Image (tube, helix red, strand yellow):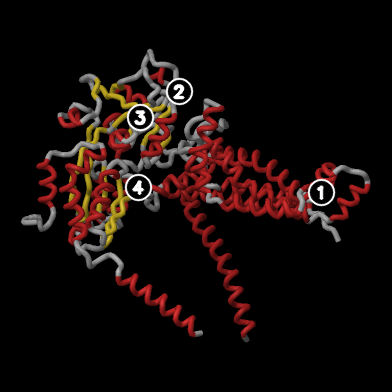
Amino acid sequence: MGSRRVFVCAVLAVAGLAMSCSPGGNDAGGLSGSIQVDGSSTVFPVSEAAAEDFMIANPGVRVTVAFSGTGGGFKRFCAGETSISDASRPITQEEIETCAAAGIEYLEIPVAYDGLSVVTNPSADFVECLTMEELKRVWEPESTVASWADLRSGFPARELRLFGPGTDSGTFDYFTEEVVGTAKASRTDFQASEDDNVLVQGVAGDEGSLGYFGYAYYAENQERLKLLGVDAGGGCVRPSDATIEDGTYPLARPLLIYVRSDALARPEVQAFVRFYLTEAPQLVPSTGYHPLPAERYEAGLAMLPGAAGM
Amino acid sequence: MKERVIGWLLFLCAALSTMVTVGIVLVLLRETVAFFGEVSLAEFLTDPRWTPNFAADQQHFGISPLLAGSLLVALGAAAIALPVGLLTAIFLSEYAADRLRQVLKPILEILAGIPTVVYGYFALTFVTPFLRSVIPITQVYNAASAAIVVGVMIIPTVASLSEDALSAVPQMLREGAYGLGATRFEVSTRVVVPAALSGILASFILAISRAIGETMAVTIAAGGLANLTANPFEPVLTMTAFIVQVSLGDTPPGTMVYRSLFAVGMSLFLITLVMNVVSQWVLSRYREAYE
């Protein structure tokens, strides 16, 4: 009995010590809490990079970043489940109304530019560029284009295997709007996934593949993918810092975050958003996207409450 | 008095499982009925396209591609698991020495204990490249890899249950056959297996229903394209993988996509229910009772 009591006391003592040493609250930054971020898989690399660096500087804060897709992210955002929603397309009227009905106010803050990339398998040495018209013929609803030869005469008769984001994805909304003409109008027989890594895997593995996703996923897998240029009438343009900045790349689009105004009242959320926008000029290029001009980030910072003098 | 309380407690536990089952069925039913308010049963069964997550004018609710995907994987898995499992069971029951059996059976159990997501990852990173080197038309996401690993996954189910059925055959049947001059192979295949047939068939059906319900391995390896095909080297979307695909995004209640989830869930439930009922019937019909 005696030794057992000693054992129990020892366990309690160790537990007590462990609890008093736990992180969260009383160290350097003083910030604690948890922040939920969800939304676009395109914006995910940037938000994730910001979250990681922020958590290193503020160990008391837990930032979780998910990627349900822009649409999925907004559904959760307007239900009050997340504080920040990543988006690779602006919020739609329907989503604005849903948020208004739930009494959720928010700030819309652009964080980067993306050159949405059309990619194919490295073995496809017969194609360097596709016109917007060809892309439309491939991706429009009820499209009958089944092989590369159908797309342009002179292409080999290789079966066309399509990969693209799922219907909850902002990239899907943006691409269909720009290429097909109506948002969400697309053929249905393609391999769909909200997870762009699944698409990378598919395009890299299949000789007749054609896919589209955010530039960051191409940048990270350059040896396995071939980037195609897009011709919107002014010649073949590949996404690059220069062509995004001067607007010649037809599929350049802003990436945004939406932050709930009531969440900004919490010090850790405000600190995170501030950190995000301040570090963006370094973070964004490291993920492969194109940073905004410095004034845009400063304008974003100025939107935050209590901006003056911080 | 204490005995009564214990009796009630045990009854409550049993009732809990029953109530949960009934609850699940009711929830499935409610949304499925709402689904069929919009989509006719004829369209559900005959339309060759399944596109519920696209815009309203492009939505098609034909379950055939999903059924084809699930069946392709399940039948492929069965083609591997049923022969291998049964032969393993025969070996364990009729041929193996006691000590060998004591080593082999636990190893078989380990195979059953590997998480299904690991099997899926294994399919994608090992089986698919191997298949592509042997059969070049295989695509990156294909039904064959998934079928192969699901087959390996359910071998223990078939082997274990069949071996139990084979062991339950009374020794005197074997001795009688040996006495008549039969070889060990003849005894196993002509006497023991037919005697244990009901248990073996039941294990087959159980294994196939497990293969149909398999989720993680097919989601990772089989693909995300609803494809009505009999070609196992193309990507397919199984019923289970569709449920994962939609659930990963956010699905507002009341939409057709949401209801299609339940319609597919109900179909899965009915298929496995029918298989279980059939296996019970087979067990009772072909059971041979010995004193």
Can the viewer see residue B278 in this picture?
A: no
The quadrant of the image that shows the C terminus of chain B is bottom right
Q: Give residue A68's mark.
A: 4
Q: Is residue A97 above or below residue B67?
A: below
- Label 4, label 1: how far apart the Cα atoms are: 55 Å
Q: Give residue B192's mark.
A: 1
Q: Are labels 2 and 3 on one chain?
A: yes
- Label 1, label 2: how far apart the Cα atoms are: 52 Å
- Label 4, label 3: how far apart the Cα atoms are: 27 Å
Task: Check the image and name the residue furthest to the top.
Answer: A154
- Label 2, label 3: how far apart the Cα atoms are: 22 Å
- Between disc 1 and disc 2, the foreground one is 1
Q: Neighbour class for label 4 at 10 Å: few (<14), some, many (≥20)?
A: many
Left/right of residue B249 with respect to residue A304 in the rendered view: right
Question: What residue sits right under mark 2 in the picture?
Answer: A159
Mark 3 secondary-structure assignment? loop
Q: Neighbour class for label 3 at 10 Å: few (<14), some, many (≥20)?
A: few
Can the viewer see residue B80 in this picture?
A: yes
